[in-house]
Amino acid sequence: MDDLAIREPPRILVPIKVLEGQALPETLVEFLAPADVIVLGYHVLPEQTPTEQASMQFEDRARAAVDDIAHAFHEAGREVETRVVFTHDRDQTVERVAADVGATAVLLPNPVGDIEELLVAVRGAIDTDRLADLVATLVGADTQRVTVVGITTDPSEFDATVAVGDARETLLARGLAPERLATETATSERPVADIVDRSDEFDVIVMGQQEGTLWSALFGDETERVAEGAVAPVLIVRGQPTESTSG
Amino acid sequence: MGATRDADGGENVNREGEAPTVVVGATTDEASVTEEGTELERSIGLVGGLAIGVGTMIGAGIFVFPGLAAGRAGPAAAGSFAIGAVIALLVALPTSELATAMPKSGGGYYFISRALGALPGAVVGISIWLGLVFATAFYLVGFGNYAAAVLAEAGVSVGGSVVVPLALVFGVLLTGLNLFGTENAAALQNYVVGLLLAILVLFLGYGGLDALGVFGRPSAPERFMPFGPLPMFTTAALVFTSYLGFAQVATVAGDIKRPGRNLPLAMVGSVLVVGALYVATIFVATSAFGSAALSSFGETAIVEVARAFAGRRGAVAILLAGLLATISSANASILSTSRAVFAVSKDALIPTAASRMNLRYGTPHVALAMGGGPTLALVALGEVEVLAEVASFLHLVMYGLICVALIAIRRDEPEWYDPDFRVPLYPLVAVPGALASFGLIAFMQPLSQLVGVAIMLATAGWYKYYANDVSLKGVL
């Protein structure tokens, strides 16, 4: 726990709706570049369209768009892996590729300007080491400030103070300067709404994957509301891959 | 995607100079991978596959044939439906093996063109497109009939004249849903099939208990074979139409998750589910009325059975089920038509422009229009019943050739042939499967046979004219 080094280089999966002109802000590219990045360009088709048919017509366009994003990372000094997928089911695809590449976190891109302030929302048991590896790698020697907020709906079930303290210790151990780190705790009936409400104060939100699959965390009710409501990009930290899914 | 064009570009192309497109290189349980490394997610599970199979088939066996079949074979009509299920299984097993060896879009057309060559492939592929158009028109008119009957039952006095307009309106709606509906078409299919199955299971459960005397009114036992055993077999030929459609599961093979497991289960499973429902329907219907009375009701026999059980509410519920059955069959057929067009267009047997799609809605608008357009024209013109039998003819030709394709490929297995599912004792399945499929054609009306043969000759002529240099055998 008291190791200064990053234990495990974080791998971030960046899903992009590649044929709908979704772009990655330049500042976000620079922010993510210290981590291993996998760009997943995907296109969702209605069920009545064979994926094969779409790939015949749009594969070249999709690959070119993903290559453009890879080039942006190249400019920022990071060579990235790219994947292009035609699918009927975005959630299934993101979940499969995330497990396939062993992603630490999945990005939900939203527009962003300069990245100065990070909100790390801790809402339940979370792999603190993975979270700290991720945050410490991304902010590194830069000047961003990190605010860890522990939110609980029921203090007797989940003690936000302990969790935030734990996260703080681990981040400090990874080399984050104390003056760049703030902590808060809150009790709220509506943790998701609270995160959304505060998203305009921050430039990037980091939060844990809650129980259930990555699917429900990413696009299920809760996080969907965060992603849609939040004005900042969101990084979802995945749970540790289990033996069965790591292959 | 690489075109299999020769160095001089002069061979293996159609009249427009378009070559077959090979899209998919490797396949896994979760995705197919194109030659450039793009992944194509497999997103239809076992339930989705079953919904396609059951949704395409279910309908005729319950809502058209019970009266007709009971009149010909008596209670042994249940045996006729069981024989039909056995024949369907004889074809479903070879189709399953071929589909697990080639889990790609196209279904029967794909297997036949790869195993037997481009000419039989073109005949099957193009004529199945027309066959599906005919079948869709038939289902839409069926929908119109049921919708008119529901209106009549509800006390709205309408003549028979509303049937065609209702069918047309609904055909436009379904085609539009598939053209512009970005996520609802497949979900609709699952809900419709689910609701339909729920109504049928309730109805058959109640009717079955009643027939066994649970409600204190044991029905008078009737001789099982009042006309002897022969009519049971000839009636099987008549009712086999109600099993057409299980191979439609193979047309979406490229989108099925874990194809090695789910394709055989979905195909064989949907035949078993539908067969069990058909046999139970005949048992319940003949127990309630006796075959002579049933026969006199004709095509609405099942509605009268429901009315006998539960009065007007029963009749309305069964009419609603009939409405759902025609919706599900029509929708599944529209989807299959679009995939059939794509499959032959990808292989340059028809202009490749037919597989164009639009990015805005992400739907294959050309292929859907090539299905929906002629369908609506046929509905407006009438005469769909002959065309429905022609559709059966063309399906049976495909089924027979699928069995032949299995035999051909097993006798001299190519290197690439590695199915996850192998038919045990395959000659004992595929040979009777082929004979039964071709044999059933002999029971059809001469007019249907004539039209069917004419269509096959026309498609062969088209191949000779347009795509004579295209070769597909063994091209994966």
Image (cartoon, coloured by chain):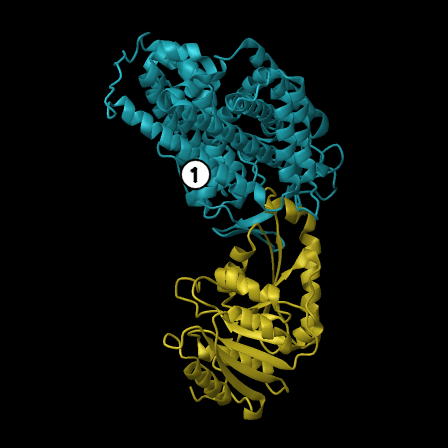
Chain colours: A yellow, B cyan
* Mark 1 neighbour class, 10 Å CA radius: few under 14, some 14 to 19, many 20 or more: many
Residue ranking furthest to the top:
B227
**Closest to the observer: B89 or A233?**
A233
- The residue sitting at 70% across, 48% down in the picture is B359
Q: Quadrant of the C terminus of chain B?
A: top right
Check the image and report above or below for B459 versus A179.
above
**Along the line of sight, the residue nearer the viewer: B291 or B129:** B291
Q: Position of residue A86 (x, y in %)?
A: 60, 52
Q: Is residue B231 visible?
A: no
Is A129 positioned to the left or the right of A47 in the image? left
Q: Which quadrant of the figure has residue B223?
A: top left
Which residue matches tag 1?
A: B266
Task: Kindly indicate the quadrant of the structure image that contains residue B277.
Answer: top left
Along the viewing direction, whichever of B400 and A98 lies nearer the viewer = A98
Would you place residue A243 above or below residue A162 in this image?
Answer: above
Q: Identify the subunit bearing mark 1.
A: B
**Residue A22's spot in the image, x, y percent?**
68, 62
